[in-house]
Amino acid sequence: MSDKIKQKYVSYMDGENPSEEFLSSLTERLKKEEKRVREKKKSALKIRVISIAAAGIAACAAVPIALSLTKTPAVHIEKPIDNLAGTVNSSAISSKPLENLADFSEITAKELANLLRNNLSELLESETNNFVNAANVDGEKCRELIGKLSSAEETNEATAGKESCYMAVFSDGKIVKFRVSENGVITINGSAKRFS
């Protein structure tokens, strides 16, 4: 008998549908709930963004304060301390920059080639005019540069393209810097002339 009751109940329930009034009220409740959840997410996002911005501002303000706290205070010495190092012979100190150890304002490319051929101690190459940790030029490249300088004539042609910078240190301590551009124009530091 229980199977028969169960079967009647199932067939009855299959025919039952929710009323239009229930469906519209359910739809309305779901829309309200969705709107409430969306607003809650937006406010949480705003709070998160404001918190991040506030933390960033606090960090930016904290760095200068921390740096000022870590600086050692300046010591004011009213009385001079005895000269513990002794005297220094200041005439032995050369204050001339490396570029000005010799006057190369009138040097020609051929004269530079002769200097390189006869007096060269070291030749460095760099992509910039900075020769810290610059590479030494090998013998083949040095001979090629000397050949290029030996055959170069004064020109009005402008430099173009990438430049290779060179610093030649001679056995007498003199230093000259020069550049060779991609189009073959040679400029020597201190000289207004160009060679090609």
Image: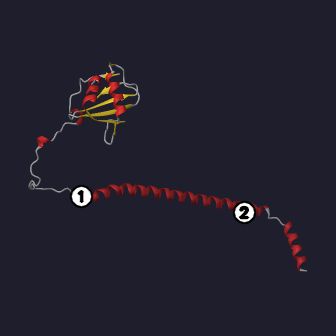
Give the image location of residue 85, x and y in percent: 11, 53
Residue drawn where x is 32% and y is 42% of the image: 133
24 relative to 87, above or below: below
Mark 1 secondary-structure assignment: loop
Q: In the rendered image, is residue 44 in sight?
A: yes
Task: State the residue in front, 157 or 15.
Answer: 157
The count of marks equals 2
Give the image location of residue 86, x and y in percent: 9, 51
Residue drawn where x is 13% and y is 56% of the image: 77
Residue drawn where x is 84% and y is 69% of the image: 13
Q: Is residue 30 left or right of residue 104?
A: right
Callout 1: 10 Å neighbours few (<14), some, many (20+)? Answer: few
- The quarter of the displayed image where residue 95 is located: top left
Residue drawn where x is 89% and y is 77% of the image: 3
Task: State the residue in front, 112 or 97.
Answer: 112
Check disc 2 and report the residue beneath it: 26
Query: Which amino acid is tagged 2?
Result: Leu
Check disc 1 and report the residue beneath it: 72
Q: Quadrant of the C terminus?
A: top left
- The quarter of the displayed image where residue 65 is located: bottom left
Task: State the residue in front, 92 or 21.
Answer: 92
38 relative to 113, above or below: below
Q: CA distance from mark 2 to mark 1?
A: 71 Å
